[in-house]
Image: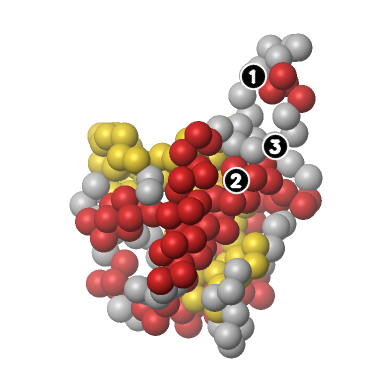
Amino acid sequence: MDRDSTHPTLAGTHIRLEPLERAHIPGLVAAAGPDLALYQWSAVPIGTAQMARYVESALTAREAGTAVPLATVRVADGAVVGASRFFDIERWSWPPGHPAATHAGPDGCEIGYTWLAPAAMRTAANTEAKLLLLTHAFEVWGVQRVCFHTDVRNERSRAALARIGANFEGVLRSHRLGADLTPRDSARFSIVAAEWPGVKEHLRARLARA
């Protein structure tokens, strides 16, 4: 992907998603805070050392073209309130001559590594972030589908994905390393291109109510 694809800034009314950089580390440390109970099922780095490793890993993935990591910034005061990421970015092997063979963007991706500061939870931040991310994926990249995975035990995350209009596909057993360092089962959700217009209107309506 070119630099415009790997370093997008996605601007909304309440938050903006900007390319993750080392300069975000202090703000991310402050956003994560000390309350580990809030992130029981999510691997959120706590403290400067952990956050620095997290950011370095994200930047390495960006340079490799496998991820697009973003910092979530509150528009009102410029405070960093979390992070999110496109990853598992796929390009399908369309046969020569197929109309999609000249498609410049990815064909599929996952959205994840998403977390918010306690003060940003239950605000418009998550809804607007998902609207910005999905708009970029479907309307700029032109993907065929976006998927999400969350720890099957994370009821809050599963409910949030259902609320934005993602469809539950099933459970992948021992799919990834969990935040508690055990093999976790992942609940898989997705949105496909044909569903995007309806999901977009649903998100816009939720944001207007917020």
Q: Which mark is residue 137?
A: 2
> Could you tell me which secondary element the residue under label 2 belongs to?
helix
Left or right placement of residue 62 versus residue 149 in this view: right
Q: Position of residue 165 (x, y in %)?
A: 38, 48
User: Toward which corner of the image does residue 27 lie, by quadrant?
Assistant: bottom right
Q: Quadrant of the N terminus?
A: top right
The 10 Å Cα crowd at callout 3, few under 14, some 14 to 19, many 20 or more, is some
Check the image and report above or below for 130 versus 185.
Answer: below
Q: How is the image coloured?
A: secondary structure
Q: For residue 45, say whether it is visible.
A: no
At 21% across and 52% down in the image, what residue appears? Answer: 153
Badges 3 and 2: C-beta atoms under 8 Å apart? no
Q: Earlier in the sequence, mark 2 or mark 1?
A: 1
Q: List the residue tagged with mark 3.
A: 105
At 60% across and 80% down in the image, what residue appears? Answer: 75
Q: Position of residue 154 (x, y in %)?
A: 25, 55
Q: Nearer the viewer, residue 202 or 139?
A: 202
Q: Earlier in the sequence, mark 3 or mark 1?
A: 1
Q: Earlier in the sequence, mark 3 or mark 2?
A: 3
- Amino acid type at image mark 1: Ser
Nearest to the eye among marks 3 and 1: give it: 3
> Could you tell me which secondary element the residue under label 3 belongs to?
loop
Q: List the residue tagged with mark 1.
A: 93
Nearest to the eye among marks 2 and 1: give it: 2
- Amino acid type at image mark 3: Gly
| Total tally of numbered discs in the picture | 3
